[in-house]
């Protein structure tokens, strides 16, 4: 999970990433949003980009960081539950 991060800085390695990956970017952070869109296309595993409306790079606007927390909580809950139900080998 990345919040306002720069996965594009690891572009050559992104095709090797097979872990489920959530990218969260503010809609007002246009440059980073574009870079995350490029990076999203390079990730090999399950991936999703969530854009938080009205959020800048640091998510300082009212309610935006709370939205990030909701998105991350839902993502981790879904993926940890998936791991918990897998049979052990």
Image (cartoon, grey):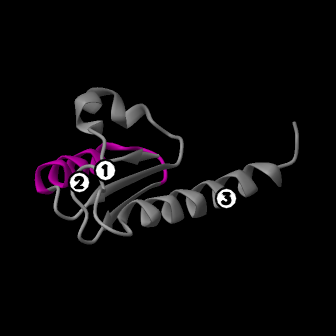
Residue positioned 15% across, 53% down in the render: 34
The secondary element bearing badge 3 is classed as: helix
- Residue bearing the label numbered 1: 40
The secondary element bearing badge 2 is classed as: helix
Residue positioned 12% across, 57% down in the render: 30
Contact (Cβ within 8 Å) of mark 1 with mark 3: no
Of label 2 and label 3, which has the lower sequence position?
A: 2
Q: Which residues are magenta?
A: 30-46
Q: Nearer the viewer, mark 2 or mark 3?
A: 3
Q: Residue furthest right?
A: 88
Q: Nearer the viewer, mark 1 or mark 3?
A: 3
Q: Residue furthest left?
A: 31
Binning the other alpha carbons within 10 Å of mark 1 as few (below 14), some (14 to 19) or many (20 upward) gives many
- Residue bearing the label numbered 3: 77
Magenta-colored segment: predominant secondary structure: helix
| Quadrant of the frame with the C terminus | top right
Q: Quadrant of residue 26?
A: bottom left
Q: Is residue 18 left or right of residue 26?
A: right
Contact (Cβ within 8 Å) of mark 2 with mark 3: no
Binning the other alpha carbons within 10 Å of mark 2 as few (below 14), some (14 to 19) or many (20 upward) gives some
Q: Position of residue 85 (x, y in %)?
A: 83, 55
Instruction: Count up the numbered dots.
Output: 3
Residue positioned 54% across, 41% down in the render: 19
Q: Is residue 41 left or right of residue 63?
A: left
Q: Is residue 1 left or right of residue 84?
A: left
Contact (Cβ within 8 Å) of mark 2 with mark 1: yes
Residue positioned 28% across, 64% down in the render: 61
């Amino acid at each position: 999970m990345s919040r306002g991060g720069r996965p594009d800085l690891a572009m050559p390695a992104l095709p090797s990433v097979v872990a489920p990956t959530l990218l969260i970017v503010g809609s007002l952070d246009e440059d980073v949003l574009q870079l995350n869109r490029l990076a999203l296309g390079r990730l090999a595993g399950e991936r999703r980009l969530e854009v938080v409306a009205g959020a800048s790079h640091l998510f300082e606007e009212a309610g935006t960081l709370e939205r990030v927390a909701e998105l991350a909580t839902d993502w981790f809950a879904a993926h940890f539950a998936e791991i918990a139900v897998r049979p052990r080998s």
